[in-house]
Image: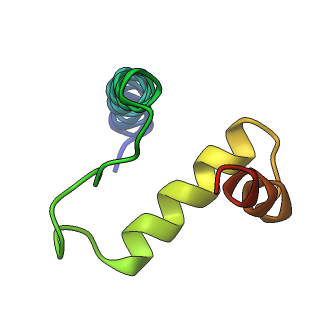
Amino acid sequence: MSLSSAAAGSAESERARAAAAEQMIAAIRNYAAQVTADKAYFPVVPPNTLTATDAMIVATALLKAVNLQVFELGLWQAWGQ
């Protein structure tokens, strides 16, 4: 692979990541708004649509993005019950 094709691939990868991030932000904000309005959680996806690994990867990335620890998530969940 030449240096120019590697750079083009890297730029394409960055665009794909930015597009995925924009889609995730929109989906997360929409879900949060629905939960807030309805005052009730609902399934994000139908059962058996994602693997446990998929869910853990995304959950970890979300917690890191907002600088939260799993402990703080546990507290949030406990306060809501």
Image position, residue 41 (x, y; %): 40, 46
Q: What x and y, as percent, mark residue 1?
A: 34, 51
Q: Is residue 74 above or below residue 12?
A: below
Q: Position of residue 22 (x, y in %)?
A: 39, 21
* Scheme of image coloration: rainbow
Please tell me in which quadrant of the rendered image residue 28 appears.
top left
Note whether 6 is above or below 26 in the view shown.
Answer: below
Q: Is residue 70 left or right of residue 2?
A: right
Q: Would residue 65 be found to the left or right of residue 48 on screen?
A: right
Residue depicted at 81% across the width and 47% down the height: 68
The image position of residue 20, as x and y in percent, is 35, 32
Looking at the rendered image, the quarter that the C terminus falls into is: bottom right
Of residue 60 and residue 46, the one placed in the foreground of this image is: 46
Q: Is residue 21 above or below residue 46?
A: above
Q: Residue furthest front?
A: 81
**Residue drawn where x is 60% and y is 45% of the image:** 62
- Give the image quarter of residue 78: bottom right
Nearer to the camera, 24 or 6: 24
Residue at horizontal 18%, vertical 71%? 47
Total marks placed: 0
2 relative to 78 in the view: left or right: left
* Residue plotted at (39% across, 79% down): 52
Residue 60 location, quadrant: bottom right
